[in-house]
Amino acid sequence: MGVDRVRPMAGAHITAEQMMKSYPGGLERLKEDWREFTKNSKWLAERNLRLSDEYKNEYVAVLRGKIVDHDPDCKALWVRLRKKYADRIHVVAVEYIPEKNIMLVF
């Protein structure tokens, strides 16, 4: 398939620079939000094993280093999160907590 046929299917084209300029609050806000998302993700990763007793087989959502919601149904969880945290949804970290954790050793 030629590029001319693929391009319309790809939708709007935007460069990283255009995206950063259009981000609400600009590049500095984007950096802050990325740091916050990273902190939330790290918080979850560090506590994954301890969370398995209480939240096994559930998706857990973390914002500002606290569990803000959980549900075995990922879609239902995201619906609630979008309603409650619409302005911060992009920094909420969500992770599935399995019944049994598997450690890979290389």
Image (spheres, grey):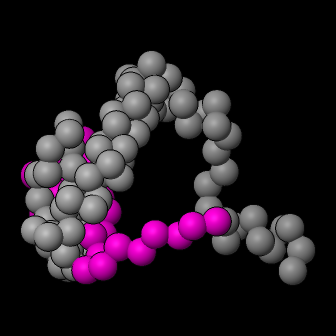
Can residue 54 be seen here? The reply is yes
Q: Nearer the viewer, residue 65 or 49?
A: 49
Query: Residue at image x 19%, y 75%?
Result: 56
**Place of residue 43 in the rendered image (x, y in percent of width and height, measured from the top left):** 29, 44
Query: Which quadrant is home to the C terminus?
Result: bottom right
Determine the residue positioned at 53% across, 27% down. 21
Q: How many marks?
A: 0
**How far from the left and from the top, in percent, is residue 94?**
29, 59
Q: Is residue 84 left or right of residue 59?
A: left
Residue most toward the top? 28
* The image quarter in which residue 53 lies: bottom left
Would you say 66 lies left or right of 4 here? left
Quadrant placement of the N terminus: bottom right
The residue range painted magenta reads 80-106
* In the image, residue 43 lies in the stretch drawn in magenta: no
Q: Residue furthest front?
A: 105
Q: Position of residue 32 (x, y in %)?
A: 38, 25
Q: Quadrant of residue 48?
A: bottom left
Q: Residue at x 77, y 71 (%)?
A: 6
**Residue 84 relative to residue 15: left or right:** left
Q: Is residue 102 above or below residue 43?
A: below
Q: Is residue 51 above or below residue 28?
A: below
Res. 75 in view: no
In reply to whether residue 101 is colored magenta, the answer given is: yes
31 lies above or below 94: above
Residue depicted at 27% across the width and 70% down the height: 97
